[in-house]
Image: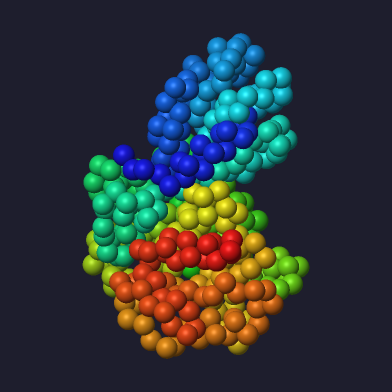
Amino acid sequence: MFARTITPTLLSLATEFPVVTITGPRQSGKTTLCRTTFPDKPYINLEQPETRQFAKEDPKGFLATIPDGAVLDEIQRVPDLLSYIQVLVDDKPAAGRFILTGSQQFEVMNTISQSLAGRTALLKLLPLSIEELTTAGVTASSSQLILNGFYPRIHSQRLNPTRVLSDYFETYVERDLRQLVTLKNLGLFEKFVRLCAGRVGQLLNLQGLGAEVGVSHSTAREWLTLLEASYVVFQLRPWHSNISKRLIKSPKLYFYDVGLASYLLGLETESQVGRDPLRGNLFENMAIIEALKYCYNRGKKGAASFYRDSNGNEVDLVMEVGPDLFPVEIKSAETIVPEFFKGLVSFSKIAPKVLLGAGLVYGGTEQQKRTAGEVWPVTRMHEMLDGVYCRETV
């Protein structure tokens, strides 16, 4: 079992709010986290048909069996239950009464915004971070991390990632998507997801993506929304000093778990990852999601974007720390060359907000201080971000 960095944040919020809601991908460890953190609370899994039927048909009777609250797993299976929970916590607003989990972020968030606004704290739990693996004594090369991904079961049981991720994807299509929408052609949808993996770290062109699959632009957009809702893909928005411009620029496409992207690309060995043309994109994907994990695990906003101008200057990641910015360049190479700092230097000249320094994350092992920014191994990104947030609070 892995110690989760999010645990102190979860415990703290459970002393302030009557409800804490945790969303995240399936198998990211939500159930284990909740049962470990709140061992004395009743645990109820709403995936179980009999339990779900009871909760749907007699919500008052169901909740009467847990008057002091409980951990309710996969709350999106009975969304109407949230309205009844609202009445209970309004009547008895004891802190930490209900701990809810959900694997479909849009459906859960929409329902919560209607029923539990102001009554629940919200957390996101993504699969394991490099920090958590390192703390547990698990070390691996960047290519191994890209191949294996970060789902806890792969690491705790030392399973073959190709087999596990194959089963994960099939289960996701069969279970999660059929709860959200009726897919008329699973074959085309699977092709769409694999093509998304082939565009990891690239600007999103939905029209071109749909045309290659053989579906309309609107269908491609609907399918991408489904992938986002189920925590499969993530869109990184472009940064602009004028927020209105941000909305009309193309985002970049990433996967919440780089191992799943690797599986969809057909990669099965570390050597295949090392020579794949998209290795740099996959490394970038891994680093960007690590930054999100850092923020989510600490209950921070996690506002992130990327920068690109018409002259080709680019910064892979711009972290927004309050009103300030921390730009990060990401390179999979193990050796640093001056060219890597070009985007950071360009960004420092146009950023109107206060820069909290700059960082370059790479595939090597040494930590260095350069004029244009600090250099950090991807395995120590959490240390880099610790320094950023410490500077921000001074």
Q: Quadrant of residue 194?
A: bottom left
| Residue 253 coordinates in the image, percent (x, y) | 53, 63
Q: How many marks?
A: 0
Which residue is at 45% across, 38% downward? 30
Which residue is at 73% across, 68% downward? 243
| Residue 196 coordinates in the image, percent (x, y) | 48, 61
Q: Quadrant of the C terminus?
A: bottom right
Which residue is at 34% across, 43% downward? 2
Q: Is residue 204 left or right of residue 371?
A: right
The correct choice, above or below, for 339 with respect to 212 in the image is below
| Residue 175 coordinates in the image, percent (x, y) | 47, 36
245 or 269: nearer the eye?
Answer: 245
- Res 186 seen here: no
142 or 205: nearer the eye?
Answer: 142
The correct choice, above or below, for 107 with respect to 298 in the image is above
Q: Quadrant of the N terminus?
A: top left
Q: Is residue 16 left or right of residue 263?
A: right
The correct choice, above or below, for 63 with respect to 21 in the image is above
Indicate how the structure is coloured in the image. Answer: rainbow
351 or 102: nearer the eye?
Answer: 351
| Residue 6 coordinates in the image, percent (x, y) | 47, 45
Which residue is at 41% across, 79% downward? 369
275 or 194: nearer the eye?
Answer: 275
- Res 124 seen here: yes
